[in-house]
Image: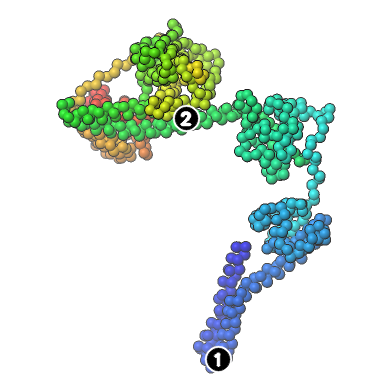
Amino acid sequence: MISERAEILRSAQILVPFLALPALVGALWLALWPQQADAGATLLVAGAAASAWYLLGGAISARHLWRGLAVRRDLGRTMPAVLGHDLPALAIDPQGLILAQNELALDRLGDLVGRHVLDLLGRRHADPETEWRDLGIRLARCGRLRTDLGDLGHFQVTREAGALVQLWLAATPEPAAAPAEPAPRSDGDDFDLLPVALITLDPSARVLRANAAACQLLGADIAGQSLAVLLDGLGRELGDWVGDICAGRTVGGAEVLHVKAEGPERFVQATLARGSGDYVTAVLSDASALKTLEAQFVQSQKMQAIGQLAGGIAHDFNNLLTAITGHCDLLMLRHDKADPDYADLDQISQNANRAAALVRQLLAFSRKQTLKPQIMDLRDTLSDLTHLLNRLVGERIVLTFDHDPSLRMIRADRRQFEQVIMNLVVNARDAMPEGGDITISTDNVRLEDPAGIGRATLPRGDYVRVKVRDQGCGIAPDDLAKIFEPFFTTKRMGEGTGLGLSTAYGIVKQTGGYIFCDSTPGEGSCFSLFFPAHDRGTAEEPAAPAASAPIRARRELEATVLLVEDEAPVRAFASRALKLQGFNVLEAACAEDALSLLSDQRLLVDVFVTDVVMPGMDGPSWVRTALRDRPDTRVIFMSGYAEDIFSEGRPPVPDSAFLAKPFSLSDLTALVARQLEEAGR
């Protein structure tokens, strides 16, 4: 309708200059030849008359007249098809008016000539105007379609290309629908013998027939029952779904539904298809394993997303803590211990360290913390922890150790492993407020084949297993699946942060191990840790921690350090710390600025100190580029993530060291000095 009005408007606009032309010529005639006023007046009157005709709708009338003639012409072409059809037939114009009908249409439908087709569409559709508009759109696309008029049957609607008149021909009625009840079984009917679960349903979703496989899958003789009594989980009434498929309003499809029968939770996938009669055939298959796998995948995705979020937050906090602790160190250098402000600065430093420990827990969960693994004997490690653990559990709890005499070694970060054990023991203590026994046992486990434990699968191989068992209140089944999520806790407000088990989970997974929990409410819980076993002959001596040398000026050392850090507060602190030690410091806010500085070959740089994660080019990338022309330059990488976050899949950068954030003033300057000493400068 809108396009038709636009076309009429365009036609009227085209006529405007032609209608005004006689009046313009008449006016010019009178101006040039006033002695021949009669001819000019005639032209002027003719132009005025034409303009008046235009203003009164002459152009529109002409347009309608032309369309009327076109409709009459198309109707003449369509009439033979209308009169020669064996069933009711109609001819309808673009506005929806019925122009003609044959005798059969007159007998069955009454006299419809001059009436609107909306009267017919209203018998089947609640919104006939929308249906008529959609019908016109579909007809313009393909020129042929089929429409349902309810009790009047189906009509085939066609319109030739360029024509205006639509031809509506009643379609041949379909064969009578088969009875709702399926045919009785015969001796040769293999319906019950099919290994696939099959059922037939009437439009109300009542089971008409079910074979033996379907009864076995759903756990009962289900014939005569409603499908809604047996299954749920679609989100709407199953009867509506089946009814839509029976009526042809919806194409059959597949849905995973929950079985309501008692016992273990089960799911079935129901695939429905419309039968030749007024019933639906459903194929059922067990989807319990599929739903379990889906739940595992969703849990894995959720834990991965939370881990990425925790790691990103921890990285940003490490930058903030580096700036806080660094500037605090700078202030403490200018104050003696007797200074009244020194105690306040010391409190700031201690609380910043506590915040750093909390950030390390987040990094442990996200498996992006810096670990220093070593080969160790769990018996020695747990023996060293005995005194501390006994103080943690108190007097009403008995802590017992049970070790395998031939226990093999594991490779892990000793400090982080101790944190895992302490977290598990503290949780066990809190689960037994009235006291009880906590048992920590170790043994060797060999898996000849992959073993599924919980939702994980342990590869075949040799493991060292650590069990922490308590006699506490246990964990509810609903909470058991969420205990390793960060900030999830069953303790009351103020009693726990919800980071203990998530930290233990992250540390164990980053070490290459596995952690599981088996709990029975009212009986206690048992946490099992599996670590890959190592031979005792491969034990490594733990590296002795470097003594923290006192900060002293290094004015005698002439060295230039290029500091690349995108965080301005961290860059400011690191620059001041290095300058206090007598180093020449060049600063850059990004990798691109650093490479621009190094383009001057006359500039001598002894050490690159760079952040790893930066906008644009990252630290390792620009360093590798710079080392092509300056191969002897030493490198120090700084990051709030683990050391291997930037080295996986790429060769290590030669002569490089790693400094984990947050770091202190002495940590930074000592590492720069050590890099220079190793280079012989």
Depth check, front residue: 368 or 681 = 368
**What element does badge 1 sit on?**
helix
Residue at mark 2 to residue at mark 1: CA–CA distance: 97 Å
The C terminus is located in which quarter? Answer: top left
Q: Looking at numbered disc 2 in the image, what kind of residue is underneath it?
A: Met
The N terminus is located in which quarter? Answer: bottom right
Q: Nearer the viewer, mark 2 or mark 1?
A: 2
Residue at the image position 53 percent from the left and 87 percent from the top: 29
- Please name the residue that numbered disc 1 is placed on: 37
Asked if residue 141 is positioned above or below residue 587 in the image, the reply reads: below
Q: Position of residue 660 (x, y in %)?
A: 32, 27
Q: Quadrant of residue 58?
A: bottom right
Q: Quadrant of residue 197?
A: top right
| Badge 2 vs badge 1, beta-carbon distance below 8 Å | no
Depth check, front residue: 582 or 150 = 150
- Please name the residue that numbered disc 2 is placed on: 303
Residue 433 vs residue 255: left or right? left
Asked if residue 106 is positioned above or below residue 552 in the image, the reply reads: below
Callout 1: few (<14), some (14-19), or many (20+) C-alpha neighbours within 10 Å?
some
Depth check, front residue: 361 or 323 = 361
Regarding residue 431, the answer to whether it shows in the image is: yes
Q: Looking at numbered disc 1 in the image, what kind of residue is underneath it?
A: Ala
Asked if residue 508 is positioned above or below residue 150 in the image, the reply reads: above
Q: Position of residue 650 (x, y in %)?
A: 41, 28
Residue at the image position 67 percent from the left and 35 percent from the top: 228
Q: Which mark is residue 592?
A: none
Residue 104 vs residue 568: left or right? right
Q: Residue furthest front?
A: 434
Q: Position of residue 100 (x, y in %)?
A: 77, 63
Q: Position of residue 250 (x, y in %)?
A: 68, 43
Q: Quadrant of residue 632?
A: top left
Residue at the image position 43 percent from the left and 23 percent from the top: 501
